[in-house]
Amino acid sequence: MAALSFPNPPLADDVVALRPWRKADIPQRFAGFSDPVCLRFSWPFSEPFTEAHVRGDLEEHERRRLDGREINLAVVDVAARDHVWGGASVYEVDGERSCASVGFWLAAHARGRGIATRTVRLLARWCFDRLELARLQLACAPDNEASRRVAERCGFTREGVLRAHLPFRGGRRDTVVYGLLPGELR
């Protein structure tokens, strides 16, 4: 599969911009993702989250981008692009089936302002227009009400629950799956 190119021009609206991660972002990414809410829903390991994980993730994300499987972007303030609000990704990209998944996380200081909804809308438009996908999926823990609301505000349809879907902190976690088709984005 061909490498995924970063969106050019970068994805942005009048509030949010999505750009490639930079090494200089490591401290903000670590601080933002270290928030208990992020760790509760997005850190599947029993071991503590460290700055070394962030450094390793940046390298792994680039390998996956070059393999055409995933693209990860920093969610930043459009007026101050060095101010990181969170992260977003398009992953599980499957060109043969024309589908992918979208994910996001926000630091505590960025929540409750519509930033996640704007981010998912930007990514979904890009996936349908540039990657020409026929389906986009969003998955989250059943008790992650904020992510479920973002999916619904963007027009995703709840399709079901995958029971014991993911290894998570020494056990298994259920996953709620939402799907979005071209023309359904709100």
Image (spheres, grey):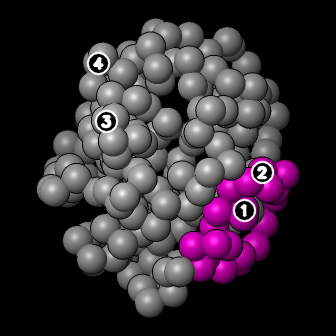
Q: Which residue is mark 3?
A: 81
Give me the C-alpha separation between circle 2 and circle 1.
Answer: 6 Å
Q: Which mark is residue 144?
A: 2
Q: Nearer the viewer, residue 109 or 181?
A: 109
CA–CA distance between discs 3 and 1? 27 Å
Q: Which residues are magenta?
A: 142-165
User: Is residue 79 shown left or right of residue 88?
Assistant: left
- Give the mark nearest the N terminus, 4 or 1: 4
Can you tell which mark lies on residue 161? none
The span from disc 2 to disc 3 (Cα, nearest Å) is 28 Å
What residue type is disc 1 on? Arg
Q: Amino acid at mark 4?
A: Lys
Find out whether residue 128 is within the magenta segment.
no
- Residue 117 left/right relative to 82: right
Determine the CA span between mark 2 and mark 4: 29 Å
Mark number for residue 23? 4
From mark 4 to mark 1, how far is it between C-alphas?
31 Å
Whether the residues at callouts 2 and 4 have beta carbons within 8 Å, the answer is no
Magenta stretch holds residue 149 = yes
SS state under label 1: helix
Residue name at image x 56 percent, y 61 percent: 117
Q: Mark 3 or mark 4, which is nearer to you?
A: 3
Residue 2 lies, in percent from the top left, at: 15, 56
* Amino acid type shown at disc 2: Asn
Mark linked to residue 148: 1
Q: Residue at x 59, y 56 (%)?
A: 114
Q: Position of residue 178 (x, y in %)?
A: 64, 71
Q: Amino acid at mark 3?
A: Arg
Say whether disc 2 or disc 3 marks the residue closer to the N-terminus: 3
Q: Residues within 10 Å of mark 1 (few under 14, many from 20)?
A: many
